[in-house]
């Protein structure tokens, strides 16, 4: 199965994706808010809430006592860009569960995005802690220090549609996850309501490239982003790819007990699975 980029040869696609994100890196966070009218924040919040299990609070060591160090909960946020998902994971673990025994490694293909992410983390309390790390690497063949069966939670948000081979990304995710580990994929889905679909189409093809031009001085990159959304598989097609990679998912349908959850009528969709 091959989805998307039919007219771009495989070897050129990564270069193309690289230049798209280099040209938008510095304006990326502002643009996300502008283009989604801030709604991407709600999608990401819901996604992270649904993916993170209950964690035990961190123990504080009293002087003169010894506590067995607890194994950290290990997350890998692939195509993690400027850290939107990673920071939400760490914030939720700390605010909701009082846990800081959790680490997120961000892997991204684009150095510009990673640099923006590092600048951002410098303003947080995770700065200079082992809780967050940035690695340059490709979702389709993860950096070699990330071992098989080593990850508790794998996330990829709005990144997988830029990858040349979806099966390669999913099989890498499967390999590095621990048995029982979870995968969450957040990506633009297909809108189901016909009227809403037409409005969304008009909005994305007319408004977004113009906004891209005005705010980032670059309409072509945004044109590309929109086309990549259109080419991405449907909700059940993508769920099937996850199953093909070995993941256990819910039923091939939307909602509770299903393989995916639609946000805003399917503008965004979260697929989840477990490594058996
Ligand atoms: N996850 C972040 C978020 O939700 O805000 C960033 C999403 S951004 C739209 C997509 C990211 O995917 C970019 O940072 C890009 O560099 C990265 N990317 C594209 N192809 C990749 C690949 N093959 N491996 C790793 N990262 C990739």
Image (spheres, grey):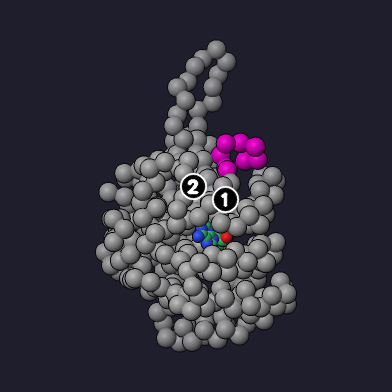
Q: Mark 2 points at which residue?
A: 143
How many other residues sit within 10 Å of disc 2, few (<14), some (14-19) or many (≥20)?
Answer: few
Q: What SS does tag 2 mark?
A: loop
Residue pointed to by mark 1: 136
What secondary structure predominates along the stretch shown in magenta? loop
Q: Is the C-beta of the residue carrying label 1 under 8 Å from the nearest atom of ligand 1?
A: no
**Residue at 33 percent of width and 61 percent of height:** 242
Classify 10 Å Cα crowding around label 1: few (below 14), some (14-19), many (20 and above): some
Q: Which of the two residues, 211 or 255, is positioned nearer the viewer here? A: 211
In the displayed structure, would residue 186 be above or below residue 235? above
Q: Can residue 46 be seen in this view?
A: no
The reply to whether callout 2 and callout 1 are in contact (CB within 8 Å) is yes
Q: Position of residue 256 (x, y in %)?
A: 32, 62
Looking at this view, is 208 or 107 the one in front?
107
In percent of the image, x 53 and y 52: which residue is there? 137
- Please report the bounds of the magenta region as a residue range: 126-133
The residue lying furthest to the top in this view is: 64
Residue found at x 44% / y 74%: 4
């Amino acid at each position: 199965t091959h989805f998307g980029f039919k007219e771009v040869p495989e070897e050129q696609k990564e270069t193309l994706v690289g230049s798209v994100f280099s040209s938008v890196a510095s304006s990326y966070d502002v643009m996300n808010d502008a283009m989604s009218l801030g709604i991407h924040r709600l999608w990401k919040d819901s996604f992270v809430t649904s993916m993170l299990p209950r964690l035990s609070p961190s123990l504080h060591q009293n002087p003169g006592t010894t506590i067995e160090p607890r194994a950290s909960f290990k997350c890998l946020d692939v195509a993690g860009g400027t850290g939107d998902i990673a920071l939400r994971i760490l914030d939720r673990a700390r605010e909701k569960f009082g846990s800081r025994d959790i680490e997120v490694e961000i892997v991204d293909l684009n150095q510009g995005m990673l640099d923006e992410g590092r600048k951002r983390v410098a303003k947080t309390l995770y700065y200079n802690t082992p809780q967050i790390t940035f690695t340059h690497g490709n979702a389709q063949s993860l950096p070699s220090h990330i071992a098989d069966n080593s990850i508790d939670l794998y996330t990829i948000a709005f990144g997988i549609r830029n990858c040349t081979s979806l099966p390669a990304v999913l099989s890498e995710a499967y390999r590095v996850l621990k048995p029982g580990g979870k995968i969450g994929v957040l990506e633009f889905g297909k809108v189901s309501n016909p009227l809403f679909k037409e409005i969304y189409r008009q909005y994305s093809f007319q408004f977004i490239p113009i906004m891209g031009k005005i705010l980032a001085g670059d309409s072509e990159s945004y044109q590309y982003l929109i086309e990549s959304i259109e080419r991405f598989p449907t909700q059940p097609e993508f769920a099937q790819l996850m199953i093909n990679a070995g993941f256990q998912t819910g039923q091939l349908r939307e909602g509770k007990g299903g393989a995916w959850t639609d946000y805003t009528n399917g503008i965004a969709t979260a697929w989840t699975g477990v490594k058996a």
